[in-house]
Image: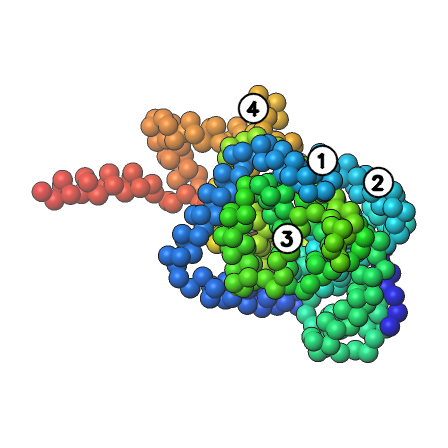
């Protein structure tokens, strides 16, 4: 079995529309997503068979997250105090560059060469693998899905199941090509092959990196749920553990964690609980046999404060990263995760990415939705995703010099021509005289109306006025009636 090359060479295309069109033409990709999403939706529905209990739990989850966010600065301070008391070193990073510098400085202080990483979407935000590779540090993904996409120099296509876009045959070919093992489509055998590579790496690694699902302020505890045991290995076997997470992951106390974990695992995979629930409250104590000698936590902002500053957009930070909104999204299930070109795809990506990278970088994301409402209905913490998408669309078309600046890159789709047309349309509809004149002209000149009127008619038919207006027909009907009497 050969050692894989792990330097990432991710090429990110610029155009979301082009990537989406390409994905729509890939029948294998669409089949892979369709069958995976169908299975996840069925499992979630089965695990929430009692609708009353589900709605009660969702309301509770929403209240817990809203309470935590209402006291976010206070809880973060308390978290830092309690973690420090437990022996964990807490670091703060406003940007991904700062977070990478912090991680690298810890690695340098230990003269580390090998890092093993449990699943962490925040480390994807930081592009940690890429940054460390540029410094000559090998950073190996230990989650099986992440390991597969890393081996194929790809990015995750789903926040819970990073390699969901691949079927067993594709993974078999990948392992055969990159690891030099015999071709097999047997899923159990493929998992064993991956484990064999990873097992050795856990013991060789100088540093383990992980994400955090919930950071408990009251006790200074980092909670991590997972099914493969790789999270526990990454956080306990290497001598140093670095946890990276967003500032919004803090909750007040351990009681809050119980319903949130239940919502997370049932919404994500239909499981009552994950196989492993890791609670990390500090480095190894003198009388303990295992665990790291040092634990660090890097708390990353990366645009979260911007969302936090607005009472409506703040709800974005309720997210517990279950992925259910993606599994139920008719757009995501058809184009897959890579088409979005960013770390977080699907509905959650559309509302969180603009805060991280600026609306101007992802202007089409808020519009890539049918607003069917499925994402909002399944969200375990009741984030009103469709309403937030509408709000981002509004921010997108605001005049760039608008006095109320809410977010970076707002007004990226502002068009004077479009603004003029909508103002004229509003004026027409609020003046009976103008409306009648418009109706008269539109019904008589309908043949002159073009069938293509800009980007909107790329996917819709242009509206064509009827030969006779409703007012004309009503007038005729009424005069006929009075003539009959
Ligand atoms: S927005 Fe809601 S459904 Fe989507 S990942 Fe976050 S918690 Fe899950």
Q: Is residue 353 above or below residue 422?
A: below
- Is there any visible trace of residue 173 in the rendered image? no
**Residue 105, numbered label:** 2
Mark 2 beta carbon near ligand 1 (under 8 Å): no
Residue under pointer 1: 92
The mark that comes first in sequence, 2 or 4, is 2
Q: Secondary structure at mark 1?
A: strand
* Distance CA(mark 3)–CA(mark 1): 21 Å
| 71 horizontally vs 280: left or right | left
Q: CA distance from mark 1 to mark 4?
A: 29 Å
Q: Nearer the viewer, mark 1 or mark 4?
A: 1
Q: Which mark is residue 279?
A: 3
Question: Which x, y percent locates residue 270?
Answer: 53, 63
Work out how far the residue at label 3 is from the one at label 2, CA to CA, in angstroms. 25 Å
Q: Position of residue 198 (x, y in %)?
A: 79, 65
Q: How far across and how far down the image is residue 154, in percent?
A: 76, 57
Number of marks in the image?
Answer: 4
**Lower sequence index among marks 3 and 2:** 2
Image point 43% across, 48% down: which residue?
A: 59
- Residue at which label 4 appears: 404
Q: How many other residues sit within 10 Å of disc 3, few (<14), some (14-19) or many (≥20)? A: some
Q: Is residue 78 above or below residue 239?
A: above
């Amino acid at each position: 079995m050969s050692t894989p090359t792990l330097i990432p060479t991710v090429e990110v295309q610029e155009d979301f529309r082009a990537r989406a069109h390409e994905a729509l033409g890939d029948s294998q990709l669409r089949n892979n997503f369709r069958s995976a999403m169908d299975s996840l939706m069925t499992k979630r529905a089965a695990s929430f068979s009692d609708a009353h209990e589900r709605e009660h739990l969702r309301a509770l989850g929403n209240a817990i997250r809203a309470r935590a966010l209402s006291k976010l600065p206070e809880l973060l301070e308390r978290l830092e105090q309690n973690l420090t008391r437990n022996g964990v070193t807490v670091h703060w990073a406003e940007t991904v560059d700062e977070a990478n510098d912090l991680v690298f400085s810890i690695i340098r202080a230990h003269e580390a060469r090998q890092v093993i990483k449990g699943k962490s979407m925040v480390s994807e935000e930081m592009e940690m693998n890429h940054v460390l590779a540029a410094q000559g540090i090998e950073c190996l993904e230990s989650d099986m899905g992440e390991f597969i996409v890393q081996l194929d120099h790809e990015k995750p296509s789903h926040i819970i199941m990073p390699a969901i876009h691949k079927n067993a045959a594709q993974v078999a070919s990948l392992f055969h090509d990159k690891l030099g093992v015999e071709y097999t489509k047997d899923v159990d055998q493929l998992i064993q092959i991956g484990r064999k590579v990873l097992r050795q790496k856990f013991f060789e690694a100088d540093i383990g990196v992980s994400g955090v699902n919930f950071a408990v302020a009251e006790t200074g505890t980092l909670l991590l749920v997972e099914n493969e045991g790789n999270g526990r290995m990454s956080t306990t076997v290497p001598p140093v553990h670095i946890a990276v997470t967003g500032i919004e992951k803090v909750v007040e106390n351990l009681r809050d964690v119980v319903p949130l974990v239940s919502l997370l695992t049932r919404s994500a995979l239909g499981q009552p609980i994950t196989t492993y629930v890791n609670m990390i409250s500090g480095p190894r104590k003198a009388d303990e046999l295992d665990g790291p000698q040092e634990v660090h936590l890097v708390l990353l902002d990366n645009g979260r404060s911007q969302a936090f500053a607005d009472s409506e957009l703040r709800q974005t930070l309720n997210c517990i990263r279950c992925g259910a909104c993606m599994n139920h999204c008719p757009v995501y299930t058809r184009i897959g995760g890579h088409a979005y070109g960013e770390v977080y795809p699907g509905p959650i990506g559309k509302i969180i990415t603009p805060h991280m990278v600026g609306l101007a970088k992802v202007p089409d994301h808020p519009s890539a939705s049918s607003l069917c409402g499925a994402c909002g209905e399944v969200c375990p913490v009741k984030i009103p995703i469709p309403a937030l998408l509408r709000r981002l669309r509004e921010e997108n078309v605001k005049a760039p010099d608008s006095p109320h600046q809410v977010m970076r890159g707002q007004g990226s789709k502002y068009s004077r021509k479009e603004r003029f047309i909508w103002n004229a349309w509003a004026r027409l509809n609020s003046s009976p005289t103008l409306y009648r004149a418009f109706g008269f002209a539109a019904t008589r000149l309908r043949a002159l109306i073009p069938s293509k009127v800009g980007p909107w008619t790329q996917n819709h038919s242009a509206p064509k006025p009827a030969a006779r207006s409703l007012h004309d027909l009503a007038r005729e009907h009424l005069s006929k009636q009075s003539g009959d009497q």
